[in-house]
């Protein structure tokens, strides 16, 4: 039985804990707050004061579910303790911290699983499989990601513990997916707009192989709307398209107006009832046990982080930015 | 009064059929085709069941013409019509540079003739509905517009409408920039362009992503790529998403359809039976009514100048790899 310590109190932390409870061969031995962050609820797992206390006790692996600005100390401590680590890209909210995180993991030589739901979900795998096979050389990809902020979630930012950067929190998921599905990114041009509580980012990506992408990322108070992801990937020989709205296995309308839980709507589950989180954490379990090599290395997570930070810098400067330029 | 209409230089695919469509839509007489390329002119005249005339002779017999010449020749035909006192509607873009477009607009103004653009989407009722929603405050404060006008790769040179290596930016930008300008009342202030030849081997770019900012700071992106597979059941797309502080409106100008799925040839597979907008009919009606009533058409030569300026800035941005301000001579 692999004993995992989960660090952080984000929505991701909550979902990860639920998935570990369902997975065989792994259990949540303890939880701790991310440095400077709120304490997660205990539940069945032992609640520690901080990461150091968690590491001092009997855990076999650490899953860092902290906002990008708080990952570095947790990952460094886990790596120093010689434990396998999971941490979603982006690794940090600036390139120096992200590089330090990657260095700590590589120097310690510990197993690492980065990536995120977009590298492990069946819907993303279905699109990725079509690149080349169905599409021929990829041309133009359009990705929409709409994260609806629910009614009564006035303090959702504090609760979620996310970085507050739409590009880092949400567009980064699609940057990571497209780096995997299409190839390395040569330059990024991003613009952001905000009106009321509605945040919107429009990002153009240019890949080294000539392909281009348009990312449409929205986080806004839309209480009735589902969390929605669409992918339209056009290549020389054909298209692969995915719309989470089409793929909803059940539509439910309630006269009482119940609030949908964003993490129950997405990611989608496959025929085994498993979703992206299940597959990613099952992979982490197997990597931590030494049964398999990681499909999402820390070096790869650093490249995704760099490309995402290029979007942040581009939006700030009003100019295209190459990932290689970030932090110079 | 029956308006007498002609067609000049039916090089662009919208040239053939323009005359008959105009007659069907409004009280107009289709007099004939005029073309300096007599062979082309005669061929289309036969297809359209009408007469062929040398250009000067056609211009004496009509009140208004549609100009469908290849981009480098548009000004020549517009000027000839203006000098003959004939009103003009022209295929977009008016020109590839704002300055050239201004010359065409000026020559028409100098001769007191109307100049309009053959851009039908302001007449699309879904676009009009989005405009009403926006004006009613349904999305709150507008922050972004996301547009697409995608289509399959063209199969003939006349569809590509390439001049000097220019492709889809020239051919597929103006429809959506026009409706974005109309719906917001703003101009495009700055363009950053990514272009490429990613879908075929014709000269000219076939992939286009524009990231723009409007004069009031509203973000506006446009995808005019020739990216649709030939067999896609929704070949051409006209989409516009309006994102604001209070809501999001998504419109699809081509989505009203019945799905057809055939097992047998021809056209095996998924197709659509579109029962969508009659925006083209309304464009023809507006053209004829404007000529009759001596009033501007819905999309004017001035709009054409502004839109040529966007196309020019997009090409410059693609060349320079940086955002470019949109400018035009007054």
Image (cartoon, coloured by chain):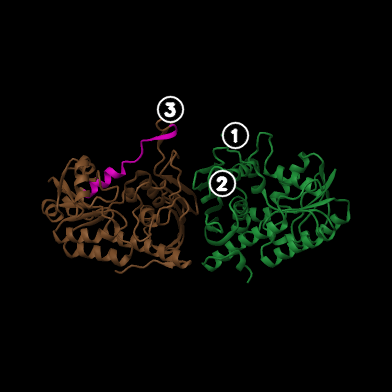
Chain colours: A green, B brown
Residue span colored magenta: B268-287
Q: Dot 3: within a 10 Å radius of its alpha carbon, few (fewer than 14), some, or many (20 or more) residues? A: few
Give the farthest residue toward the bottom: A328
Q: Position of residue A189 (x, y in %)?
A: 53, 62
- Please state if A323 lies on the left or on the right of B216 as rendered: right
Parent chain of label 1: A
Residue of label 3: B264
Residue of label 1: A249
Q: Dot 1: within a 10 Å radius of its alpha carbon, few (fewer than 14), some, or many (20 or more) residues? A: few
Q: Quadrant of residue A104?
A: bottom right
- Of the numbered discs 2 and 1, the one sitting upstream in the chain is 2
The stretch drawn in magenta includes residue A313: no
Residue of label 2: A132
Give the farthest residue toward the right: A57
In terms of depth relative to the viewer, which is nearer, B249 or A84? A84
Q: Position of residue A191 (x, y in %)?
A: 52, 61
Question: Disc 1 on helix, strand or loop?
Answer: loop
Q: CA distance from mark 2 to mark 1?
A: 28 Å
Query: Same chain for the residues at labels 2 and 1, yes or no?
Result: yes
The stretch drawn in magenta includes residue B280: yes
């Amino acid at each position: 039985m692999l004993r995992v310590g989960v660090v952080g109190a984000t929505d991701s932390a909550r979902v990860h804990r639920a998935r570990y409870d369902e997975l065989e061969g792994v259990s949540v031995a303890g939880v701790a707050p991310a440095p400077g962050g709120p304490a997660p609820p205990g539940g069945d797992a032992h609640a520690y004061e901080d990461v150091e206390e968690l590491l001092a006790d009997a855990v076999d692996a650490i899953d860092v579910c902290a906002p990008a600005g708080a990952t570095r100390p947790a990952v460094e401590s886990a790596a120093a303790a010689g434990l396998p680590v999971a941490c979603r890209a982006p690794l940090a909210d600036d390139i120096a911290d992200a590089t330090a995180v990657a260095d700590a993991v590589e120097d310690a030589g510990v197993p690492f699983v980065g990536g995120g739901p977009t590298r492990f979900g069946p819907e993303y795998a279905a699109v990725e499989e079509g690149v080349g096979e169905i599409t021929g050389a990829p041309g133009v990809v359009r990705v929409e990601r709409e994260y609806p902020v629910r009614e009564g979630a006035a303090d959702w930012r504090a609760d979620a513990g996310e970085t507050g950067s739409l590009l880092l929190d949400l567009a980064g998921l699609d940057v990571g997916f497209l780096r995997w599905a299409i190839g390395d990114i040569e330059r990024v041009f991003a613009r952001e707009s905000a009106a009321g509580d509605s945040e919107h980012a429009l990002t153009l990506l240019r890949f080294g192989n000539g392909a281009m992408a348009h990312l449409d990322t929205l986080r806004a108070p839309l209480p009735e709307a589902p969390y929605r992801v669409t992918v339209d990937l056009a290549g020389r020989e054909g298209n692969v398209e995915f719309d989470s709205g089409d793929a909803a296995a059940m539509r439910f309308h309630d006269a009482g107006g119940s609030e949908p839980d964003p993490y129950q709507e997405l990611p989608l589950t496959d025929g085994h009832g498993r979703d992206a989180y299940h597959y990613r954490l099952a992979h982490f379990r197997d990597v931590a046990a030494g049964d398999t090599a990681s499909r999402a290395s820390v070096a790869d997570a650093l490249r995704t982080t760099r490309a995402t930070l290029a979007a942040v810098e581009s939006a700030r400067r009003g100019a295209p930015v190459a990932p290689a330029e970030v932090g110079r | 009064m029956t308006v007498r209409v002609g067609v000049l230089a039916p090089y662009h695919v919208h040239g053939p059929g323009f005359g008959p469509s105009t007659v069907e839509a409004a009280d107009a007489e289709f007099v004939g085709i005029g073309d300096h390329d007599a062979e082309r002119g005669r061929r289309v005249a036969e297809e359209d069941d009408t007469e062929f005339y040398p250009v000067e002779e056609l211009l004496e017999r009509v009140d208004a013409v549609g100009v469908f010449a290849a981009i480098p020749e548009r000004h020549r035909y517009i000027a000839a019509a203006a000098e003959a006192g004939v009103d003009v509607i022209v295929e977009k873009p008016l020109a590839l540079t704002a300055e050239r477009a201004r010359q065409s607009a000026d020559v028409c103004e100098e001769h007191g003739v109307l100049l309009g653009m053959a851009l039908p989407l302001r007449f699309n009722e879904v676009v009009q509905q989005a405009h009403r929603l926006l004006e009613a405050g349904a999305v709150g404060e507008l922050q972004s517009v996301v547009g697409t006008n995608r289509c399959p790769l063209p199969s003939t040179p006349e569809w590509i409408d390439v001049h000097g290596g220019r492709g889809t930016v020239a051919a597929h930008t103006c429809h959506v920039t026009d409706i974005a300008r109309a719906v917001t009342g703003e101009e495009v202030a700055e363009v950053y362009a990514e272009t490429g030849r990613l879908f075929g081997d014709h000269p000219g770019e076939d992939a286009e992503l524009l990231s723009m900012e409007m004069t009031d700071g509203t973000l506006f992106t446009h995808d005019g790529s020739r990216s649709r597979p030939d067999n896609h059941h929704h070949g051409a797309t006209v989409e516009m998403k309006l994102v604001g502080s209070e809501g999001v409106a998504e419109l699809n100008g081509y989505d009203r359809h019945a799905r057809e799925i055939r097992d047998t040839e021809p056209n095996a597979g998924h197709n659509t039976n579109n029962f969508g907008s009659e925006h083209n009919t309304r464009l023809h009606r507006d053209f004829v009514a404007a000529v009759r009533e001596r009033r501007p058409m819905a999309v004017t030569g001035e709009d054409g100048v502004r839109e040529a300026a966007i196309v020019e800035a997009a090409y410059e941005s693609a060349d320079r790899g940086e955002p470019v301000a949109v400018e035009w001579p007054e």
